[in-house]
Image (cartoon, rainbow, N blue to C red):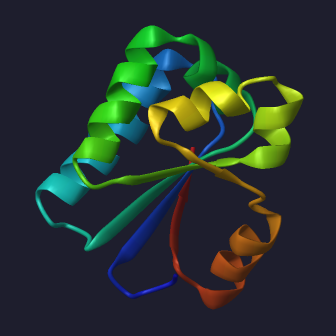
């Protein structure tokens, strides 16, 4: 999980501009240009509602996945916000993320929080 060339982006913002101008832009280009061997975007909190309801965000999530970016979501958040099925239909892996996030933080892996 925590390879030296892996990057995790913890996306918690519900602002479309933050998704477009940082999360999507950096994750997609980082993978496309091989800046990192693995890029994983983790949808957590308010971002789950945005990802589950905004069609333009959904198109870009699909584009990231097709481009090799791993996109996963916190199951507890997605369930609470009623968007688990929608996220899964986009190809997002929906799972409990508390323990994996703790492991990432303790390992010193590269993590951006937005």
**19 relative position to 96: left or right:** left
**11 relative position to 68: left or right:** right
Residue 10 position in % (x across, y down)? 59, 52
Residue 60 occupies which quadrant of the picture?
Answer: top left
Can residue 71 be seen by looking at this rendering? yes
Up/down of 91 relative to 113, above or below? above
Image quadrant for the C terminus? Answer: top right
Up/down of 60 relative to 97, above or below? above
Up/down of 32 relative to 17, above or below? below
Residue 19 position in % (x across, y down)? 45, 29
**Looking at the image, which residue is at 40% across and 33% down?**
61
Can residue 21 be seen by looking at this rendering? no
Up/down of 92 relative to 112, above or below? above
Residue 15 position in % (x across, y down)? 57, 19
Q: Who is closer to the viewer here, 100 or 25?
A: 100
**51 relative position to 62: left or right:** right
**90 relative position to 35: left or right:** right
**Looking at the image, which residue is at 60% across and 12% down?**
53
Q: Who is closer to the viewer here, 80 or 11?
A: 80
């Amino acid at each position: 999980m925590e390879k030296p060339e892996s990057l995790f982006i913890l996306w918690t913002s519900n602002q479309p501009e933050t998704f477009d101008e940082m999360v999507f832009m950096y994750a997609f280009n980082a993978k496309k240009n091989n800046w990192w061997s693995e890029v994983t975007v983790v949808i957590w909190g308010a971002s789950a509602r945005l990802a589950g309801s905004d069609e333009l965000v959904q198109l870009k999530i699909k584009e990231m996945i097709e481009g090799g970016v791993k996109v996963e979501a916190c199951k507890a958040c997605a369930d609470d916000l009623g968007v688990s099925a929608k996220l899964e239909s986009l190809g997002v892996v929906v799972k409990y993320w508390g323990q994996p996030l703790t492991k990432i933080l303790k390992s010193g892996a590269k993590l951006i929080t937005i």
